[in-house]
Image (cartoon, rainbow, N blue to C red):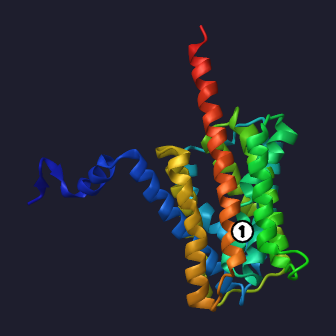
Amino acid sequence: MAYESGQPHSRLPKQVWLNLPAATRGILLMVGSTMLFSIMHTAVRYLSAELHPVQIVFFRNLFGLVVFLPLIVKSGFTFLKTDKFPLHLLRAGLNVGAMIAFFTALSTTPLARVNGLAFTAPLFTAVLGVLLLGERFRLRRWTAIVCGFVGALVILRPGFAPIDIGSWLTLLSASLWGMTMVVIRILGRTESSLTTTGYMIILLSLLSFGPALFVWQTPQPSAWAILLMIGVTGTAAQIALAEALKTAETTAVLPFDFLKIVWAAMLGFLLFTEVPTIYTWTGAAIIFASSFYVAYREQRLSKRTSVRAEGTP
């Protein structure tokens, strides 16, 4: 039969999805996002034995642009109208730097360690928000931020173990991503999401092409499929993450972001015989808990501000 309960079969999966509670949909999207990010990270690690990480960054952005191109064309390029181009350029430059540092770290450092240290990005964002945007934090959030960076020290164990270059690059990437998030907040005050996303996709491809030329090596036929997978999974992961945060409360979906390190540990063990240390697990848990608390406090403050604004005549 072509219909069941008055609904075409082709519409049933969508209807089932929409009938799920918003929190459930948000959680499933977040879990899917963590899996896609982990697949991308693993593919970067695998392919870095053949291609330079900087070149992989370029192809990740190029294929991401291909995925978004139909939407950009459909918009008629109207999103290009902006008087904030320098900020868009700054955001893209910081983003490219963060990606190059992160992909290079993935090529040399265990996946679980990189993902654990990457959880410091929201902490850098919070600190930079205070320094650059004049945001005010009270004692509890400052305590959470300090605890988060203590978690990074637990992973790195300075003085007890040598700190590899990949770990330093991961922290550099997290700090650059923190700066990127501050710029995104500023752009969000006046720019549409299409303008912000469109400029990001285009500029990332352009800005990463130059550095890639210095390390260029023609990919082997087998590498093209992996490069395409990196671009598609990376873009799909970002879309799933954005939809998860849009669909449900941040505090409902964010705890599942910790699955990144779980998938990373599993894939790292299966493909590269990497075994995360107890220090990696402990430090990552501390960092993640701290980042989650900061996000929780920011959400509560945002709600209070919104209620007060609504109550103002």
Relative to the observer, which residue lies in front, 214 or 239?
A: 239
Whether residue 6 is visible? yes
How many other residues sit within 10 Å of disc 1, few (<14), some (14-19) or many (≥20)? many
Question: Could you tell me residue 107's position as x and y percent?
Answer: 74, 82
Instruction: Name the image quarter holding residue 218.
Output: bottom right
Compared to residue 61, the image places residue 94 above or below, namely above
Residue at point 60% right, 44% down?
A: 194
User: Is 79 left or right of 253, judged from the image as shown?
Assistant: right
Q: Which amino acid, by three-letter code, is at mark 1?
A: Gly
Residue at point 65% right, 57% down?
A: 289
User: Is 71 left or right of 120, judged from the image as shown?
Assistant: left
Q: Quadrant of the N terminus?
A: bottom left
Q: Which residue is mark 1?
A: 283
Relative to the observer, which residue lies in front, 260 or 83?
A: 260
Residue at point 77% right, 46% down?
A: 126
Question: Could you tell me residue 270's position as x and y percent?
Answer: 56, 89
Question: Could you tell me residue 184's position as x and y percent?
Answer: 72, 44
Callout count: 1
Whether residue 180 is visible? no
Compared to residue 238, the image places residue 7 above or below, namely above
Instruction: State the residue lying farthest toward the right.
Output: 159
Question: Could you tell me residue 200's position as x and y percent?
Answer: 70, 53
Residue at point 78% right, 66% down?
A: 152
Q: Quadrant of the C terminus?
A: top right
Instruction: Name the image quarter holding residue 28.
Output: bottom left
Instruction: State the residue lying farthest toward the left.
Output: 1
Compared to residue 190, the image places residue 162 above or below, namely below
